[in-house]
Amino acid sequence: MLLSVVSLSLIGGIKSHSLVQRQNLRASLSISFSMMATNSVRVAAAQMTSINDLAANFATCCSRLVKEAASAGAKLLCFPENFSFMAAKDGEGVSIAQPLDGPIMDQYCSLARESSIWLSLGGFQEKGSDDEHLCNTHVVVDDTGNIRSSYRKIHLFDVDVPGGRVYKESRFTEAGKDIVAVDSPIGRLGLSVCYDLRFPEVYQLLRFEHGAQVLLVPSAFTKVTGEAHWEILLRARAIESQCYVIAAAQGGKHNDKRESYGDTLIIDPWGTIVGRLPDRLSTGIAVADIDLSLVDSVREKMPIAKQRKPIDFWNAASL
């Protein structure tokens, strides 16, 4: 959109120049726009309403969302937390949890390979260290179907939601311990899951210690917390880290007990929303072109990486 507006404005001004000048200017513009285009890569973020049916959720991912993203030319498709299974009762997720080399994940790896697309699979029920627990695991699969990296959710959702229900994720889930970033054709990806969004130090480490350029935040925010904080938290993480943020969201009623806010977003490093699903609750994809040169430009013009104080400074600071 921006290129179209700029090109029309500039070409309109070309008319006042001579023929040779117009030809030279058009050639120059063509080269400039071509160079800008080669810096960008298309990404997509999926929104869905998962249920406690593995086959039904896979059919939604496979038959519709991956096909839409691939047809749109996306190199990466991000799925929300609990994409493959949304429990309807306590402990149900543990009963279906599998290792990352199990048949459930193998289906999604095959899907990535067959569609030649990278997949961000946020919030997979990975089998835990005992029979009573699982890991809420964000898995990145490349376009050949190989798992490139996995991150286990560190901050578990143990919250009494105002006006809502009480959640106790730690009852059935083990917390992860490691910050994870991975290289991809889309840039260096910083992995997180849902409730991590409220802890900015995660994203500070991903940016300043692990070199992330794109932050992935697959989520299933509740309706109450989503209405209050979803967009503002995501834009804050983008601005303070100077990274793109891709936030794939669950949306709508999964069962009688659980409803998610939705509103899948893609945000640039200046905090501008560049991709958004028009319907906050529908199943579909948001698409945007990521330009890593914009990341470099924002960081160069506002060099917070050089200006931020090390932890030792704050430890020694007087109160």
Image (cartoon, helix red, strand yellow):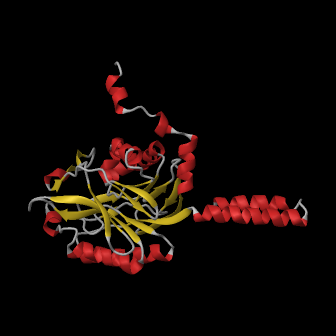
- Horizontal relation, residue 156 to residue 224: left or right: left
In percent of width and height, residue 3 lies at 66, 61
Q: Residue furthest top?
A: 318
Q: Nearer the viewer, residue 194 or 221?
A: 194
In percent of width and height, residue 283 lies at 40, 69
Q: Residue at x 84, y 61 (%)?
A: 14
Quadrant that contains the N terminus: bottom right
Q: Residue at x 38, y 81 (%)?
A: 114
Q: Residue at x 67, y 63 (%)?
A: 33
Quadrant that contains the C terminus: top left
In the rendered image, the vertical position of residue 317 relative to residue 199, given as above or below = above
Q: Residue furthest left?
A: 131
- Horizontal relation, residue 279 to residue 4: left or right: left
In percent of width and height, residue 314 lies at 35, 27
* Quarter occupied by residue 61: bottom left
In percent of width and height, residue 295 lies at 53, 51
- Horizontal relation, residue 224 to residue 159: left or right: right
Residue 43 in view here:
yes
Residue 87 in view here:
no
